[in-house]
Amino acid sequence: MRLALSLLLLPALAQAEAASPTWLHCGQIFDSASGKLLGEHALRIEEGRIAEVVAGAPRGEAIDLRGHTCMPGLIDLHVHLSNETNPQAYAEGFRLNPEDFAFRSVGYAKRTLQAGFTTVRDLGGHIALSLRDAVDEGLIEGPRIIAAGKSLATTGGHADPLNGVSRDLLHSFGYPGPEDGVISGPLEARRAVRQRYKEGSDMIKLTATGGVLSFAKSADNPQFLPDEIEAIVRTARDYGFKVAAHAHGAEGMKRAVLAGVDTIEHGTYMDDEVMKLMKERGTWYVPTLMAGAFVSEKSKDPDYYPEIVRPKAARVGPTISATTAKAYKAGVRIAFGTDAGVFPHGQNAGEFALLVEAGMSPAEALVAATRSAAQALGMEAEIGSLEAGKHADVVAVRGDPLQNIRLMEEIDFVMKAGQRYR
């Protein structure tokens, strides 16, 4: 009886914590504007927001984080919370129901939040829309989710849900169209965007080129004609949507950047011309190095991916790393994203060390996952820094992550909107 009562009281206690003033006493705080540590500070949290940031000790009782570095809640701009890699993933799509994937996603969301990621951008899948709403309603624990809903693809392209199935099954299922996120031509492109609006998506994701894990030969061929991408972006703007473009090949990237997309995801074979265009237009680059490293490693296992996927997976990891290093040196704006789901959820922070290996300083890598990611989302007024008025999204690690970026993989404290989760 006592346990049952305690469980019933937990939501009320969490709400009370978020509503009443709370002080955090931090040994250091990370300033995502300057990329510097500012020494001992205290944060006053009230009604889910940062009410005050003061140098030195707090004025009242506080959560003791004096041995820690406090940072803004981390942001991952590329996750897939409705699924997770495993050797049976290709078969599961035929034998599992949407409810099965939905129940799994609850655990993935909790793992992501526990790893310090208080905001994520989910780039593909209907389940994320309901998962987002369940988190917002306090039904489950998870990060704040910006959900794209179904990714937009061309017929037979990356993100066509029936890509690679037999002809008999295709005739049985019916050919997917704009309502399913699959288009041919500008008119269907506009219909697909409007359908995402109807379904409640927060943004649009399109697959401008082939993909590594799709059941198809090419990972990098362009898959949308320029007028199709232009129709998507123009229609998206009418509905207040930002647009992310999955793209491995240079020509597909070029078409997407010229059409006005906001972010390029992966960017494996990005060339100098694309980098120049991205700098001119302010397009963000989201490298997803963790995914590249994972698929390259798993390509060595003949039982993990289908044979048509393995050669693509073997090439992509080292190439993305080299491209990220080159893009960073060229001055392309880089924001943090991992493609979690391609590798196990909750390991997102491994991206920090890979960004540092690609040439970024630890401070720059942290900025990429806070201030820069918030700017890419258009949410810099709400998240991405520890400032009065912003959401009380705070994470902390013991020690100095600017000296050891691997500390980001050992998050000790997680607060989202004033509520403690770790």
Image: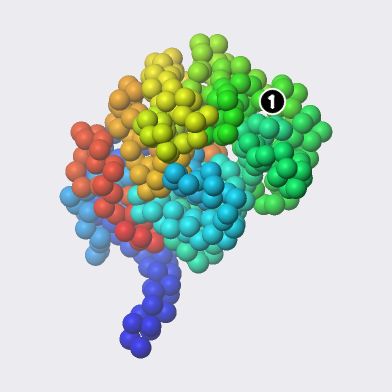
Q: Position of residue 358 (x, y in %)?
A: 34, 23
Q: Which residue is mark 1?
A: 224
Quarter residue 403 falls in: top left
- Residue at 36% across / 64% down in the picture? 21
Q: Quadrant of residue 44?
A: bottom left
Q: Is residue 263 left or right of residue 338?
A: right
Q: Residue furthest top?
A: 272
The quarter of the image holding the C terminus is bottom left
Can residue 169 be seen here? The reply is yes
- Mark 1: give few (<14), some (14-19) or many (20+) Cα within 10 Å: many
Residue 325 image position (x, y, % from top left): 38, 19
Asked if 71 appears above or below 114 in the picture, the reply is above
| Residue 383 appears in the rendering | no
> Residue 111, percent across and down?
38, 54
Q: Nearer the viewer, residue 410 or 104?
A: 104
Name the image colouring. Answer: rainbow
Lateral position of residue 83 relative to residue 158, left or right: left
Looking at the image, which residue is at 32% across and 45% down?
Answer: 71
The amino acid type found where label 1 is placed reads Phe
Quadrant where the N terminus lies?
bottom left
User: What SS does tag 1 mark?
Assistant: loop
171 shown above or below 134: above
Does 332 appear above or below 406?
Answer: above
Residue at the (56%, 41%) spot, across then down: 123
Q: Left or right: where does residue 169 sit relative to residue 252?
A: right
Left or right, 65 with reference to 118: left
